[in-house]
Amino acid sequence: MEKEVIVSGKKFKGVKPRGGHASLRGYEIKLSEKTLVLIVGEKGYLACGYLNLEIADKFNDCCAIITGVNTVEEMLEKKVVSVSQKAKEVGINTGMTGKEALQFI
């Protein structure tokens, strides 16, 4: 079953929820030359390359990294390039899209 998900007031279709979604919060924060992009859910987060997986693992965070993005929309379409140990445990894998990974966070 696919449903529409709202991330920070923007609607996205085609997300396959696992047990239903609580709210997701998306952030686009301009930092010098680039933008930090982050989507936060109840169980984890999708992040751009600004964030560090070593620290995510240290704190047992469920984190998937998606690089080369400047917006939440781009993050949903691009592929996960690396994941924390906790993200692996819940089923997030490299190569899945951000939209696919949303079901786990």
Image (cartoon, grey):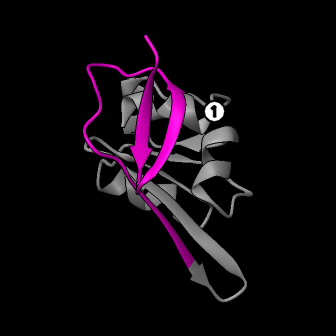
Q: Is residue 37 above or below residue 87?
A: below
Q: How many marks?
A: 1
Residue 80 at what x, y percent from top left? 63, 39
Of 58 and 26, the residue lying toward us: 26
Q: Residue at x 33, y 19 (%)?
A: 18
Q: Residue at x 27, y 24 (%)?
A: 20
Where's residue 73, x and y in %?
62, 50
Q: Residue at x 37, y 43 (%)?
A: 62
Residue 92 on the magenta segment = no
Lateral position of residue 84 relative to residue 75, left or right: left
Quadrant of the rendered image containing residue 98: top right
Q: Residue furthest top?
A: 1
Q: Quadrant of the C terminus?
A: top left
| Foreground pick, 70 / 2 | 2
Looking at the image, residue 33 sits to the left or right of residue 5; the answer is right
Is any part of residue 90 visible from this angle?
yes
Q: Residues within 10 Å of mark 1 (few under 14, many from 20)?
A: some
Provide the residue span drawn in magenta: 1-29
Q: Residue furthest bottom?
A: 32
Left or right placement of residue 55 versus residue 76 in this view = left
Residue 16 appears in which quarter of the rendering?
A: top left
Mark 1 belongs to which amino acid? Thr
Q: Which residue is mark 1?
A: 97
Q: Can residue 66 be seen?
A: no
Front residue of this view, candidates 65 and 74: 74
Classify the position of the N terminus by image quarter. top left
Q: Secondary structure at mark 1?
A: loop
Where in the figure is residue 49, as x and y percent of width and height? 62, 61
